[in-house]
Image (spheres, rainbow, N blue to C red):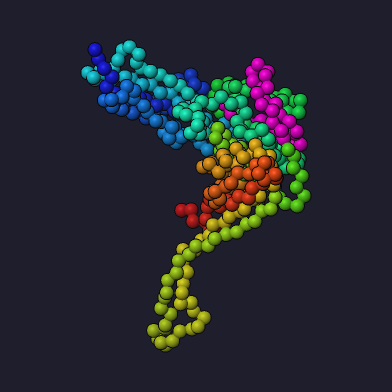
Amino acid sequence: MATLKSVNLSIYIYTGTSDKELQSSDLKYTLTKSIISYQDNIVFEIAEIVRDYIDVTFNNDYESRTVWVKTVANLVDDTDTIFTYGSPVTNTSLAFDGYGFYEDEINPQLTAYDLISSSTIYLPEDTVGKLPVYAATTGSVVIDSVTTTITDNGNTNQKIKYVDIPANTTSIAVKDSGGTTQKTITVVNVCEPKYTPYKVTFINRYGVFQDFYAFKKTTESFNVTDEKFKRNIISSSTVTYGVNQAQQTRYNINATSSITLNTGFIKEDMNDTIEELFLSENLWIRYNNKTLPIIPKTKTLQFKTVLNNNMIDYTIDFEFAFDKINNVR
């Protein structure tokens, strides 16, 4: 009786609808892996491969960033013959640039309707917001009694819908296709007369763009880096030097700018959002009417609770993810 020796895995990554006719360019990888003698299964880890094909660029636009992943596994026996029974094994999945936590165990599946972890959204007064929802599971979104129907045409550019939250909205109900409310979200409209609120957008655990506003005190700073060398300033003709000449000379000068934001007082359920912001690889801030990439400088944060702290707010340091002097070559 033939036994399993190896598996040849073809990985197709593409956009559009899942059942589209695949092109040769959609085949991204072909992997071969042999079975280990004391194991019964052959396992492929393809998450990092797939991530390379999910575009996470952002310029204050909100677009669905997903891809289809089709795997075709041909099972090979110990005579180097492909099994005719049970082979090939084909699977097609929709991939997001998200992640699961350790407690979620292996291969967590997306079952959410709205694609944010908290039940509260904070917006400046008179400001429109965005709510990301999963089109495959969400039937409608009711915003202050106004219903928006969510449709899913199967295309990757429609799988994530960013529903507009009108200015000064107070409540949102996210419903499934049967009309059952799956989540109720409270919208808090913040009047901030003294400080300028800043919007930070990040990729959350579901792999979608999520906005987070910081409402209170903001401070900005910059850190300069340079190198120096000591030069000879003596004139060979006069054997003198001028005291206005620098003996120490700077070069390779540049700087990085930083910004410190304070959230203002928020509800405890926003702790999940804060955590996901810290864990995100991609963050942007809306700054002087431009969308600029940033990196959290704060690496340690102690979560606050109503029980322990009564009032909850956070101060977070960010660094702009580019040099002050343009050195892009």
- Whether residue 149 can be seen here: no
Q: Quadrant of residue 143?
A: top right
Q: Quadrant of residue 44?
A: top left
Query: Quick check: is 171 in the magenta stretch?
Result: yes
- Residue in the picture at 50% in, 34% down: 101
Most extreme residue toward the left is 79
- Decide which of 73, 218 is in the foreground and name it: 218
- Left or right of residue 169, residue 214 in this image: left
Query: Quick check: is 181 in the magenta stretch?
Result: yes
Magenta residues, dominant SS class: strand
Query: Where is 304 relative to 23, above or below?
Result: below
- Whether residue 145 can be seen here: yes
- Where residue 164 appears, as percent x and y from the top left, is 68, 32
- Where residue 268 appears, as percent x and y from the top left, is 66, 39
Q: Quadrant of residue 117?
A: top right
- Decide which of 97, 18 is in the foreground and name it: 97
- Left or right of residue 186, residue 48 in this image: left
